[in-house]
Image (tube, coloured by chain):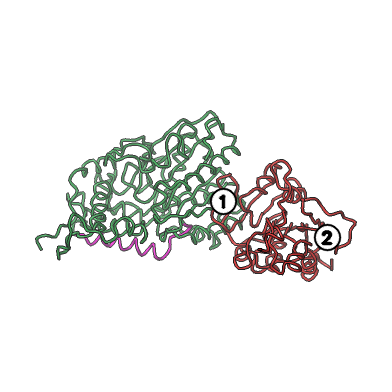
Chain colours: A green, B red
């Protein structure tokens, strides 16, 4: 059909994206062959690098460092213009002057996860052993691997204890892994819209996305870079499907309803008649310009494998036994990807471990994505939690902003 | 002429000492310094703040989302939860004290809740409005309607308080489930303790609310 518009191919930023994978326009910590990253799959990854950004200053006591863990398709560019897309930082709502994570009070660190495609070692990077892009030869990584790499970065930065580790979704999983693996190094933890294990439904959605990527003939068994193609159609479909899971029925209805896109009447075709279709196609095509398809496979896999209780003889509370970390768990009412029941299970386990835990469920119709959006009630809670923790940590309260 | 005009709602808002409610001060005085405390039904966290100001390690459970979020915004460790269903998730002996302040009457299973309090905590502190209070009795006897007060202003058809009891009823329940009363205080209309040397029936008549410090009874009371 002549009037069917498919997802446009990435033309603008493709080279930038490939360049960022090995040569990030951010800080980089390089680890040589003498400092391998021990991966859960049994491989020692060396050499490797971690791309990261920092905001604010580390205080003399080295007690004000906050680590932000990014979500599946996030990166280290939390609060600065993105080098590939030119868009503003992905968590500008949360980080900045007068925001809950204020660089004038805290030393804020965010690193690209291992397996990512914005400068930390991942499948889009050149494999030093072959001189070619890793692709599917990259070892399978897990959430604990990501956190182990972050801990090596934090060591490199000379920080013993993080004042707070914060993150949503896959970032929240990393927060929980931090507290389970390095409880004495995490003074406070703010896991948002996440769970201690990936549910069957979420694994199913990820498998859908991966199959969409692999079904694209341009994927070429993962060797698309060497063969000068890119599975942008498959990756865009994966993103479109995933994006639906980040929203809610109510939010989609409020935003788009059944409204038409630039037309009054249906065209009786498969063109994007509806605004919601047009929006999803835009989400898909803008995503492929900044993200590597193989990286998407590896990172979704890492989330699928995540199950803290399984690493502690099936008893979640054992993961947090005797923990001194102060927790603030946050969920959103309309989040059906990581529903409140998941957070509640975490809270029960923390209670059973006698951890100091707060738990707030925020009322919003904006679905899983709410943690990235402007939700004042969430910010009030994050700010107050950090201020109370800061007081307990002995951080100066000169710049306190009352909620 | 309406009933309210002939019988105005009794004013029973507890007297405040400084910024704290009298009943909260009484409860806080029952808690030994350095203890770990769980406040079930902690509302907006006033009692928890008082306890924390005394160096007590306090946690809270609150049913209403707004209440929880206000507590967390105050820096308190409070989780959203239901006394009837969520106490079972707490391990035995997790706290030194579990407090149930003005909440017992709103639970569906007061007896099960009370048993859980003393499973989770070595001691429990329970306060509740006394339905044997003379003004309550008078409203029913003379007014012929379900009692309402400033503290309990809801009408019978929309009240969350579904299990009212008198001090006498509560004492009886404690006997039945082998709970020992370590301390019992009845507060009058003005938040003052009813003198100790008076018999139970006086407490039951003149106590606007009862505050009890309980522990696991073992053999008898």
Where residue A270 sits: x, y (%)?
17, 63
To the question of a shared chain for discs 1 and 2, the answer is no
Q: Residues within 10 Å of mark 1 (few under 14, many from 20)?
A: many
Q: Residues within 10 Å of mark 2 (few under 14, many from 20)?
A: many
Q: Chain of mark 2?
A: B
Residue with the mark numbered 2: B203
Looking at this view, is A194 or B76 the one in front?
B76
Q: Is residue B189 above or below residue A105?
A: below
Say which quarter of the image contains residue A4.
bottom left
Judging from the image, what secondary structure is the residue with disc 1 in?
strand
Distance from Cα at disc 1 to Cα at disc 2: 38 Å
- Relative placement, left or right, of A201 versus B12 is left
- Numbered badge on residue A358: 1
Residue occupying the point 75% across, 45% down: B33
What residue range appears in magenta? A195-216
Taking the view exactly as shown, the residue that stands out farthest to the bottom is B176
Residue B100 seen in this snapshot: no
- Relative placement, left or right, of A240 versus A79 is left
């Amino acid at each position: 059909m002549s009037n069917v518009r498919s997802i446009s191919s990435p033309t603008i930023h493709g080279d930038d994206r490939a360049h960022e994978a090995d040569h990030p326009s951010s800080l980089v910590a390089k680890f040589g062959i003498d400092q391998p990253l021990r991966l859960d799959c049994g491989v020692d990854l060396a050499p490797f690098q971690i791309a990261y950004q920092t905001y604010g200053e580390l205080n003399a006591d080295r007690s004000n460092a906050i680590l932000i863990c990014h979500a599946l398709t996030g990166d280290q560019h939390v609060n600065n213009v993105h080098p590939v897309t030119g868009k503003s930082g992905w968590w500008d709502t949360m980080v900045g002057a007068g925001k809950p994570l204020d660089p004038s009070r805290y030393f804020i660190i965010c690193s690209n996860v291992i397996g990512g495609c914005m400068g930390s070692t991942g499948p889009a990077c050149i494999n030093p052993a072959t001189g070619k892009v890793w692709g599917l030869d990259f070892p399978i990584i897990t959430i604990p691997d990501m956190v182990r790499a972050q801990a090596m970065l934090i060591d490199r930065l000379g920080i013993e204890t993080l004042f707070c580790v914060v993150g949503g979704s896959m970032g929240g999983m990393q927060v929980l892994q931090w507290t389970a693996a390095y409880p004495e190094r995490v003074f406070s933890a703010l896991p948002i819209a996440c769970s201690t294990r990936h549910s069957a439904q979420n694994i199913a959605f990820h498998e859908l996305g991966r199959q969409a990527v692999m079904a694209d003939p341009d994927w070429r068994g993962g060797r698309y870079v060497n063969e000068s193609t890119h599975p942008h159609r498959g990756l865009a479909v994966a993103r479109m499907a995933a994006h639906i899971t980040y929203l809610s029925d109510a939010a989609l209805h409020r935003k788009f309803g059944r409204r038409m896109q630039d037309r009054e009447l249906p065209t009786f075709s498969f063109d994007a008649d509806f605004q919601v279709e047009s929006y999803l196609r835009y989400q898909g095509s803008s995503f492929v310009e900044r993200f590597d398809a193989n990286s998407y496979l590896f990172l979704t896999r890492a989330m699928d494998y995540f199950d803290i209780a399984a690493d502690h003889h099936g008893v979640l509370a054992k993961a947090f036994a005797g923990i001194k970390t102060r927790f603030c768990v946050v969920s959103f009412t309309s989040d059906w990807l990581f529903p409140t029941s998941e957070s509640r299970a975490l809270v029960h386990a923390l209670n059973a471990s006698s951890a100091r835990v707060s738990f707030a469920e925020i009322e919003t119709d904006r679905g899983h994505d709410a943690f990235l959006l402007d939700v004042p009630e969430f910010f009030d809670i994050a700010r107050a939690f950090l201020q109370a923790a800061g007081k307990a940590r002995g951080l100066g309260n000169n710049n306190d902003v009352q909620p | 002429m309406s009933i309210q005009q002939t019988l105005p709602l009794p004013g029973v808002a507890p007297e405040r000492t400084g910024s704290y409610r009298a009943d909260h001060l009484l409860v806080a005085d029952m808690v030994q310094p350095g203890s770990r405390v769980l406040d079930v039904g902690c509302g907006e966290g006033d009692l928890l703040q008082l306890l924390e100001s005394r160096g007590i390690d306090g946690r809270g459970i609150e049913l209403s989302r707004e209440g929880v979020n206000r507590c967390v915004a105050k820096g308190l460790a409070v989780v959203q939860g239901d006394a009837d269903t969520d106490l079972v998730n707490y391990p035995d002996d997790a706290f030194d004290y579990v407090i149930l302040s003005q909440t017992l009457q709103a639970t569906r299973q007061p007896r099960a809740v009370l048993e859980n309090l003393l499973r989770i905590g070595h001691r429990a502190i329970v306060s509740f409005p006394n339905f044997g209070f003379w003004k309550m009795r008078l409203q029913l006897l003379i007014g012929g309607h379900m009692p309402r007060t400033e503290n309990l202003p809801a009408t019978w058809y929309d009240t969350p308080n579904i299990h009212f009891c008198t001090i006498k009823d509560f004492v009886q329940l404690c006997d039945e489930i082998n709970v020992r009363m370590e301390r019992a205080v009845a507060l009058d209309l003005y938040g003052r303790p009813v003198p100790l040397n008076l018999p139970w029936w006086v407490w039951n008549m003149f106590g606007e609310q009862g505050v009890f410090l309980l522990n696991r009874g073992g053999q008898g009371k």
